[in-house]
Amino acid sequence: MRPAAENMFNWSREDPSHLFYQTGGRRPFIARAEGVYIWDQQGRRFLDGSSGAMVSNIGHGNARVLEAMRAQMNATTFGYRLHFENEPAERLASVLSKLAPTGLDRVFFASGGSEAVESCIKLARQYAIAKGEPKRTQVISRFPSYHGSTFGALAVTGYAPLNDPFAPMIREMPKIPAPTAYLDRDNLSDEARGCRYADMLRDKIEETGPENVLAFIMEPVGGASTGALVAPDSYYQRIRDICDDYGVLLIYDEVMTGVGRTGTFLAAEHWGQSPDIIALSKGLGAGYVPLGAMIARRDIVDAVVSGGGFMHGYTYAGNPLACAAGLAVIQEIFDADLMANTAHIGALLKRRLEDLMTEFPFIGDVRGKGLLLAFELVADRETMTPLAKELNVFAKLVEYAYEEQLIIYSRRTRGGHEGDHFLICPPMVTNETHVDEIMEKLTKSLHRLAADLKLPVNG
Ligand code: PLP
């Protein structure tokens, strides 16, 4: 029976949780956060070595963003887009169009990464219809990959534990292997390997029937599913060329890589690439608000709009509060020169992680760009054989680090079945002292893991 209104809001920390996403053990309650640190209600301080889920790019509690949000809240928090235009949304769209590659200057807002990815796929589809190519329905993607949790985004995601329960309900989309060149033990040059992986897209388009292929979606630097996977340089332009050859749209999912995380505003800039459509989220709202965006080529949007309009939308799309926060996030990144810091600190942190390979022979690989970094643990570095999956190393090391008050993020590397990688992605405000602290806590955690599992450690 429903309690009386005066009892409805009674609650104690000791009550069992009603949130069923709290799997595993309970976590401490968060109290406050500032910069790279988060405090729990017991006063313990954690270093946020993964920016949450690679979200809090500019650090916690940024005064400029909070002030911009307060000012916007005092004016209005919501105005429905069909009833009013709002200045923060217009301003943010204007900034994003200037930061995107030439020709991509049409912006559509969402409230998260999955929503942004859904928007990209639907826009691509409506463009094909507008161009008189209605047979184009297939969106090729990579395995492993992660593009989101909604059905459309899941159809292009390649991570078995997330896909499997829903596979019978989803129209399966074609996949090509992610460019895991670091696992290859052949005699090819890096350049040849990059081309080999890219050519798998050509083969898949031919196999699917070029007339059926709508788009190819990829994370320019891999995220959770691959652990900061970077393809050989030759891969990127070759992929662009193949898409052009077949009239296939190239979608970059920059939900994790975008907004400065890799040291440039978009990861695409590292390779001078211009995709046709881009998805952004995480670092755009940066933990202050739920916010996502799609940036698309003007001619694609024009064709869809003149063909009757984009048949898609979200209630909170482009709401003034989220956009005011996103705008302040980008201003902060430029004013505080956080992308230069990300490139500098990212390179330092990567070197320090590589140094750990001497002490811990079970670190098989260190990879990534900027402050999107990861390392992978293996049973044998020569063959890159994963550690036995029953050991659950991906969960164990995270727990040891948590006990050291360092937060890191892990997933299974090899398609979600086995393999253990750990993302080290602190906020873009990380300094050299923070790097020392991360390394000290991480080294202790690795020693505890090695002692627990009897893994070899060098002097
Ligand atoms: N795309 C990529 C590359 C991601 O990393 C994520 C989330 O981790 C998503 C899409 C989905 O974003 P969200 O969880 O905000 O829906």
Image (cartoon, grey):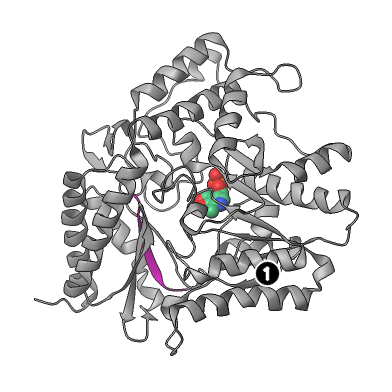
Establish if 182 lies above or below 285: below
Q: Residue at x 59, y 73 (%)?
A: 198
Observer-nearest residue: 259 or 283?
A: 259
Mark 1 element type: helix
Q: Position of residue 276 (x, y in %)?
A: 67, 52
Q: Which residues are magenta?
A: 418-427
Observer-nearest residue: 434 or 315?
A: 434
Name the image quarter holding the N terminus.
top right
Q: Quadrant of residue 387?
A: bottom left
Q: Quadrant of residue 46?
A: top left
Whether label 1 lies within 8 Å of ligand 1 gets the answer no
Q: Residue at x 43, y 44 (%)?
A: 260
Establish if 119 lies above or below 12: below
In the image: residue 134, left or right of residue 22: right
Residue 261 visible to an observer of this rendering: yes
Label 1, residues with CA under 10 Å away: few <14, some 14-19, many ≥20: some
In the image: residue 402, left or right of residue 297: left
In the image: residue 303, left or right of residue 284: right
